[in-house]
Amino acid sequence: MTKRALISVSNKDGILEFAKELVALGYEILSTGGTKKMLQDNAVAVTAVDEVTKFPEILDGRVKTLNPMIHGGLLGKFDDASHQAQMNEHGIEPIEIVCVNLYPFVETISKPNVTWDDAIENIDIGGPTMLRSAAKNHQYVTVIVDSNDYATVLEELKAEGATTIETRRKLAAKVFRHTAAYDSYISNYLTEEEFPESLTMTYELKQNLRYGENPHQKAAFYQKRLGSDFSLAFATQLHGKELSYNNIQDGNAALQIVKEFELPAAVAVKHMNPCGVGTGVTLEAAFDKAYEADPTSIFGGIIALNMEVDAATAEKLSHIFLEIIIAPAFSQEALDILTKKKNIRLLTIPFEQAKQDSFNVVSVEGGLLVQEPDRYGFSNADIKVVTDREPTEQEWEALQLGWSVVKHVKSNAIVVTDSHMTLGVGAGQMNRVGAAKIAFEQAGEKAKGAALASDAFFPMSDTVEAAAAAGITAIIQPGGSIKDQDSIDKANEYGIAMVFTGVRHFKH
């Protein structure tokens, strides 16, 4: 019986060498279109698929392998007498190896200004069908969708004359993962509903991690292939150790905060909460403010900066133990300074894509929660001054900074700021006045004359009472409590300017 291998690939990396090795091992090569021509042009003997099917390619190549002469050869059981009798009756010969990869649908829709027709024409039909047929019949058929597997297949063929069932099963599983991912890209491209009746998302392995949140937990990092590159998944690492699970979580939190600012800004994060945020006329000045906000917690933290890191800023960064520094770019002088520290990770990310939002996805036991990102900012808010006194110009600046930061702090959240930096952050407390007390304690004397931002309304006036005692002069909060008037009255009693935004910023 002639050994047959069917090869039809859009990505031709390594395929010529693979085909030559198969021919040397006694395989007849079946092929189509561009793959057939490439092999023939390189003196590899090839049998055209239409010679096997006795039917020409039609409909501009849309139909060429969808034929019983092909799929019978892929699906027939080699040791089943009934199958063999039917195959002999119809002149169908088995195909032992299938090497197929698919039309470049994702690459096509990733191009700028791609047309709908181009996208549709790059939906592969015959390829997935052959792959699925061969993968279903992996008891007998070796199916390859990834050029990285050519060497393994050849090694086993040369050593044993056939691949092992273990290898065929692994390759079949890879095929079904591949076709499932391919179909998910297509369905998502065609889907117009915001929340369709079923949701399929595809992520590709970026790296295996040393461990998860703790050393006894295994972990890996997967990335979305399509979407904004403003992500740790697509960062370019210029220096330092590989990222850990917690590094990635903290780095993502820092990125989400720093993208709020147009002015030069620096954000320091610990355990997914900001410990210091600063803005300034220069990046160095912004970092000075972020450091001053909490010089204790910044130790071992993650820093995100929204401008190219210059030498002056790098010099100050180099004197602190930091896990990661993320920025749009680093000057050569900054790199020369920072790369002297062996373990610090330096990452660049395209900040020009920072405003491209995608859905937030959070896993829970047995399911996923999917929501729009919290895009609501100060410029969107329906601002209402509800107290007798309006904020001063400086207080407005502090309120805006606080409102930009508080939505990134775990609820219950209170942030105390002046016009250029955070002074105190109270995060993740079970009651709001408790979060406020933590923020006031951190701010200390700097709370006098500062602003307070709350992620949700005050259920009673005790937070305002505590704010007045700390010296706070302006408050921004959503409002909406049935006891709002109690808080307003208390603010008026102490001469505090209070602003309602109408929208809360819970972050669980």
Image (cartoon, helix red, strand yellow):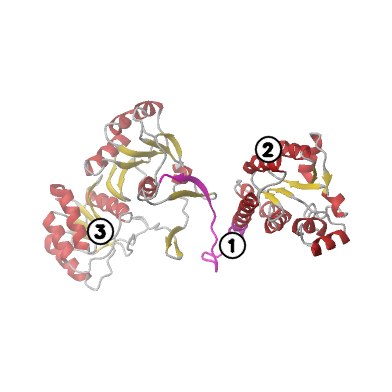
Task: Identify the residue position indicated by label 2 in the image.
Answer: 14
Of callouts 3 and 1, the N-terminal one = 1
Q: Is residue 78 found left or right of 484 in the rendered image?
A: right
The residue segment tinted magenta is: 183-210
Q: Secondary structure at mark 2?
A: loop
Q: What is the three-letter code of the residue carrying label 2?
A: Gly
* Residue type, numbered disc 1: Thr
For label 1, the crowd category at 10 Å Cα-Cα, with few meaning under 14, some 14 to 19 and many 20 or more, is few
Identify the mark at residue 476; answer none if there is no mark. 3
Is disc 1 placed on a helix, strand or loop? loop
Q: Compared with residue 222, is residue 454 higher up or lower down, i.e. above or below?
A: below
Of badges 3 and 1, the one in the foreground is 1
The kind of residue on which mark 3 rests is Ile
Report the number of discs. Answer: 3
**What is the CA distance from the residue labelled 2 to the residue labelled 3?**
61 Å
Percent x, y of residue 148: 62, 42
